[in-house]
Image: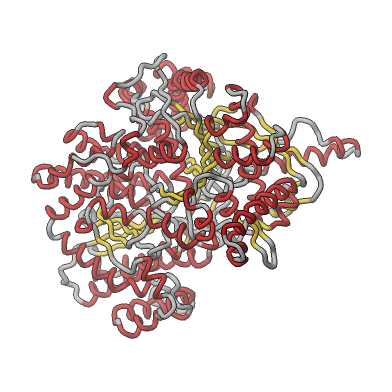
């Protein structure tokens, strides 16, 4: 049976054996729980609120893991292995209580204690706020990678920022998105441990003031920023390794600014402290239009400067030769957000350590590595040279010197080709000169990777081709993955138990083992059991849905899900158009033999992304019209679930029958929700984009529902594509568009959705919705046909689960560790 998917897997760090049984803990969680209630909350156990009980249980679980956490740190200090540092502006963690209990394998102990106390674990777990320190896929990937690194016993650490406000909370009012602040730290977080003794300083050359919500930067006023570490435990599966996620909170220095103090401005100096503390107040939503983005630049520098200071301090504790830095430290940059690490590490080595430029450069490049996450031009970071100059003048000098030397190399390789020099340059010339952060990251690191095969290929051959020509050996691919602990074992107990009963539990740490399910796809009794597991997951979800929102859906309908950030390239609009076509078919023939479907949408729109917000309104408006039409009652329903976050994904994905992955080919870097759905036995309707291509290769295209233009076709047909052709030649397309344009879904007002009509027709349909609509509708017909054959459906779904093993983040991390970091596991006794 083939279990190795890549050559790297042969030399992979071995996963912690799940069969070795749980580690033993010091202390009794029951006693700890009561002590926590009394000591932390000063409340008699009988009088505690639900939230106090949650906090006490969480603290009791943290007490359980504390010893392992210390032992992990000591084991690393003793062995002095090469360490891995994952720098990311986002960690979309979600809840931790049940995840930590399962990964500690402490469920039996905790359950027993909870029974004695008559506590309901699920009820308590729901009290924990989602740690939403990220926007979407990129931040969730960072969280999955931490789980895998701890499970693989790698000596790794995550570094990020401790935002007091994470991604906004989404409410829907009259069908429209409203953003509310997410004050997730309003109450003390039971997982974090503040480390005041590990405080570090970072220097910028301007003062920062916030007036009317907009940051004002005053030049030539050197300031010290103070970073306070807040640590969170990252429990590997089996509980042997407990790694650390260190999040920096901004504070003001303990001394007053002397200049201002001497002028008697005591009040001003104290107010400056408040401004300093604002730096890590809030996560930036992923829109590039925000006027306040200058503060984001300072945030990025703050992450880099604090993390590097901490990393280098630790390096110096165990090593006295700077030349061994790349042998002892690997730093991965999650997108360009921490790319200032290139100039900051150079600054430290040249200015503070006083190594020569060439030596410093060699160490920098060999220590750092970069992951690219997007090809969208508007999402590639470019910071104005003026902003660099204002905040970090020394960094700007260093960047110019890096670029000067780099362009010499380019000229030597391509003499006379000044076009190439300009395209490759780290500096973009133009009305406002800017630093291209992706170029800085590629030139200043030894490895650049994309996150799916097609994405890495397009990155190398199109987006940064001129740099790939200079450094072909630096470019590679590391297809994303997700942790099977959270995304199968924890979120889908019915399916997880069925799988374990059938093939044992090794799949939890070695997901390729799921291949053993292949023969069971043809076993009628296993198929029946598989269908029962899906029904159980659907019931669990519909029970929650009814309790939380009052909504009732047809439980035997196909649960068809598109949950992700709202973006034109992800094409929620294509799904809406298809739903309107289906709606019209139901209306035209009320007895049509079409199986009932419930379409679920969830996702946030960036607050300044007007069209994305209008798409949310359209989805809700279509949902409203469909809901009140007796012709489709019980057969077609559209549901928009507000406040998409990790916990909502954990609830809905196990219940899904169909996963919608329908981005315009060439635009979705990888996708990771596609993988979560596959593991949970949903069938994918998708375009040939991102990792969906590799998923279909693994499962076999006959078990997938692929459709639409390829990335190649999208790129080459751009020039002559005309959406009007489809409007004029396909009656169903025209009918759907006319309903939107005529105000059918907006109480007769044709103006409400006019911008959507314009985007799809007048403005040329940049994301080619209409080109793919016909093939999409026909693919959905094939899905409906398969529904009439429950055994055939179950067979395909089982084969999808069986071939999802490659999309474990354990596989991704194994490839990073062997091919980029050259780091090995460091088991903790
Ligand atoms: C997995 C996940 C994502 C990424 O979804 P894509 O469909 O791959 O864009 C975003 N948000 C949350 C909460 C997730 O769990």
Query: Residue, x 53% and y 66% (percent of image)?
Result: 610
Q: Which of the colour schemes (rainbow, by chain, secondary structure, one colour) is used?
A: secondary structure
Residue 748, image x and y in percent?
Answer: 42, 78
394 relative position to 692: left or right: right
Residue sitting at x 20%, y 31%: 504
345 or 518, which is in the foreground? Answer: 345
The percent position of residue 440, horizontal first and vertical second, equals 60, 51
Q: Is residue 266 visible?
A: yes
Q: Nearer the viewer, residue 414 or 113?
A: 414
Give the image location of residue 722, x and y in percent. 40, 81
Q: Quadrant of residue 212?
A: bottom right
Q: What quarter of the picture does the C terminus occupy?
A: top left
Q: Horizontally, is 312 left or right of 256 in the view?
A: left
Q: Name the residue: 73% across, 49% down.
A: 397
Question: Quadrant location of the N terminus?
Answer: top left
Above or below residue 423? Residue 11 is above
Q: Residue furthest bottom?
A: 728
Image quadrant in which you'd find residue 749: bottom left
Where is residue 827 shown, x and y percent of the image? Answer: 40, 23
Look at the picture and state if 34 lies above or below 214: above
């Amino acid at each position: 049976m083939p279990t190795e998917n890549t050559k790297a897997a042969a030399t992979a760090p071995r996963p912690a054996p799940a069969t070795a049984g749980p580690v033993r803990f010091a202390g009794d969680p029951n006693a700890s729980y009561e002590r926590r209630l009394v000591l932390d909350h000063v409340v008699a156990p009988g009088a505690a609120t639900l939230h106090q009980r949650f906090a006490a249980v969480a603290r009791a679980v943290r007490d359980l893991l504390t010893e392992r956490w210390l032992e992990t740190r000591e084991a690393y200090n003793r062995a002095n292995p090469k360490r891995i540092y994952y720098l990311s502006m986002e960690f979309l963690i979600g809840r931790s209580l049940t995840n930590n209990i399962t990964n500690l394998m402490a469920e039996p102990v905790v359950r027993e204690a909870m029974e004695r106390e008559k506590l309901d674990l699920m009820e308590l777990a729901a009290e924990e706020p989602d740690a939403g320190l990220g926007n979407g896929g990129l931040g969730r990937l960072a969280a999955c990678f931490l789980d895998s690194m701890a499970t693989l016993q790698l000596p790794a650490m995550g570094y990020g920022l401790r935002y007091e406000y994470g991604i906004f909370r989404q409410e829907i009012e009259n069908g429209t998105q409203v953003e509310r602040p997410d004050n997730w730290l309003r109450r003390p977080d039971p997982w974090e441990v503040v480390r005041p003794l590990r405080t570090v300083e970072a220097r910028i050359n301007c003062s920062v003031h916030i007036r009317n919500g907009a940051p004002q930067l005053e030049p030539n006023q050197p300031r010290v920023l103070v970073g306070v570490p807040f640590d969170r435990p990252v429990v590997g599966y089996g509980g042997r390794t407990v790694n650390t996620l260190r999040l920096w909170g901004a504070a003001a220095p303990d001394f007053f600014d002397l200049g201002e103090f001497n002028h008697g401005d005591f009040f001003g100096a104290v107010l400056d402290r408040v401004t300093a503390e604002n730096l890590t107040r809030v996560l930036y939503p992923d829109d590039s239009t925000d006027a306040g983005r200058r503060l984001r630049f300072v945030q990025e520098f703050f992450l880099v400067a604090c993390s590097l200071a901490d990393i280098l301090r630790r390096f110096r504790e165990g090593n006295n030769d700077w030349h061994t830095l790349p042998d002892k430290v690997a730093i991965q940059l999650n997108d360009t957000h921490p790319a200032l690490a290139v100039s900051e590490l150079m600054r430290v080595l040249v200015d503070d350590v006083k190594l020569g430029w060439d030596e410093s450069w060699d160490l920098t490049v060999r220590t750092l590595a970069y992951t690219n996450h997007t090809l969208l031009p508007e999402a590639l970071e470019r910071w104005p040279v003026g902003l660099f100059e204002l905040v970090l003048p020394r960094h700007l000098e260093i960047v110019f010197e890096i670029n000067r030397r780099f362009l010499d190399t380019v000229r030597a390789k391509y003499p006379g080709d000044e076009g190439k020099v300009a395209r490759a340059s780290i500096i973009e010339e133009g009305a406002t000169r800017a630093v291209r952060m992706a170029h800085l990251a590629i030139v200043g690191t030894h490895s650049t990777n994309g996150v799916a095969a097609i994405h890495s290929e397009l990155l190398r051959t199109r987006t940064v081709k001129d740099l790939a020509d200079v450094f072909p050996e630096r470019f590679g691919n590391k297809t994303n993955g997700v942790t099977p602990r959270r995304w199968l074992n924890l979120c889908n107990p019915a399916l997880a138990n069925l799988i374990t009963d059938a093939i044992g539990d090794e799949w939890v740490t070695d997901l390729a083992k799921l291949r053993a399910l292949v023969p069971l796809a043809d076993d009628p009794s296993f198929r029946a059991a598989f269908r029962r597991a899906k029904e159980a997951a659907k019931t669990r979800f519909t029970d929650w849905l009814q309790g939380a929102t009052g909504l009732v859906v047809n439980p035997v309908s196909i649960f068809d899900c598109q949950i992700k950030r709202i973006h034109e390239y992800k094409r929620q609009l294509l799904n809406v158009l298809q739903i309107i076509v289906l709606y019209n078919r139901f209306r035209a023939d009320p007895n049509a033999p079409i199986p009932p479907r419930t379409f679920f949408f969830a996702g946030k729109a960036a607050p300044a992304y007007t069209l994305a917000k209008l798409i949310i309104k359209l989805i809700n408006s279509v949902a409203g019209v469909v809901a009140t039409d007796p012709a489709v009652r019980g057969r077609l329903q559209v549901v928009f679930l507000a406040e998409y976050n990790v916990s909502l994904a954990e609830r809905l994905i196990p219940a899904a029958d169909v996963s919608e992955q329908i981005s315009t080919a060439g635009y979705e870097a990888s996708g990771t929700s596609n993988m979560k759905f596959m593991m949970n036995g949903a069938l994918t309707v998708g375009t040939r984009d991102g990792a969906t291509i590799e998923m279909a290769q693994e499962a076999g295209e006959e078990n997938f529902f692929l459709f639409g233009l390829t990335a190649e076709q999208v790129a080459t047909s751009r020039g002559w594509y005309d959406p009007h052709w489809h409007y004029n030649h396909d009656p169903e397309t025209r009918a759907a568009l006319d309903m939107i344009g005529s105000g059918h879904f907006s109480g007769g007002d044709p103006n409400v959705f006019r911008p959507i009509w314009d985007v799809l027709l007048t403005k040329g349909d940049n994301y080619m919705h209409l080109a793919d609509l016909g093939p999409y509708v026909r693919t959905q017909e094939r899905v409906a046909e398969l529904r009439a054959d429950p055994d055939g459906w179950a067979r395909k779904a089982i084969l999808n689960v069986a071939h999802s093993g490659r999309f474990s983040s354990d596989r991704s991390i194994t490839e990073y560790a062997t091919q980029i970091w050259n780091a090995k596991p460091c088991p903790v006794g």
